[in-house]
Image: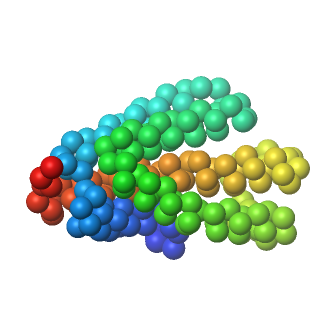
Amino acid sequence: MTWLFGITWLAIPFGAYFGLKLARAGEGPLRPWRALAWPAIGVAVVLVGLRLAGRLPPRFPPILIVIWLVMVLGAALAWIGWPALGRTLLAYGLASRLPVALVMFFAMRGNWGTHYDYVGVPFASQLSFWPRYLWLAFFPQLVFWVGFTILMGALAGSLAVALLMRPRVS
């Protein structure tokens, strides 16, 4: 249940909330089910891409770049389906992940011994502060997790609008 105290899962309810708000404001997709197809394709691409990335040699940092690119691709596909929601989720993702990156900065700098400075890779302690922070905290928060927020938020927002709203007439 520790996930409950994190922010990762919030992409889903906030995605639905933002999607419904945008649709009610007249900024919803013309074809909600088509808009939903794009993040669904994005999720499939991410699942396949991460599975394939798992077969690559786990060399650092190239493996991280591959993983981040896979998530960015998934988010970009989701964005195509409903750009207004994509922009909103990008703003939300940055607003929610920048504070985490800042807390991780202080935790790593001060060796707090919490989940904010433990990144789960054995070689992390061998890296000096800036490479460790940038590769294992800053970029993951602002690339991978913002991409995840866009992808899952777009999936939830598009699904909510497809199920709960009447189609918009052009």
Image vertical order of residue 56 relative to residue 34, above or below = above
The residue drawn where x is 36% and y is 55% is: 85
Quadrant of residue 89 within the rendered picture:
bottom left
Residue 151 x %, y %:
41, 49
Residue 62 x %, y %:
68, 31
The residue drawn where x is 51% and y is 73% is: 5
The residue drawn where x is 47% and y is 32% is: 49
- Looking at the picture, the colour scheme in use is rainbow
Residue 118 x %, y %:
72, 59
Q: Residue furthest front?
A: 170
Residue 20 in sight here: no
Image vertical order of residue 91 relative to residue 125, above or below = below
Left/right of residue 28 with respect to residue 86 in the rendered view: left
Total marks shown come to: 0
* Nearest to the observer: residue 25 or residue 20: 25
* Nearest to the observer: residue 35 or residue 111: 35
Left/right of residue 68 with respect to residue 130 in the rendered view: left
Residue 62 in sight here: yes
Left/right of residue 97 with respect to residue 106 in the rendered view: left
The residue drawn where x is 58% and y is 40% is: 68
Residue 9 x %, y %:
43, 63
Quadrant of residue 39 within the rendered picture:
top left
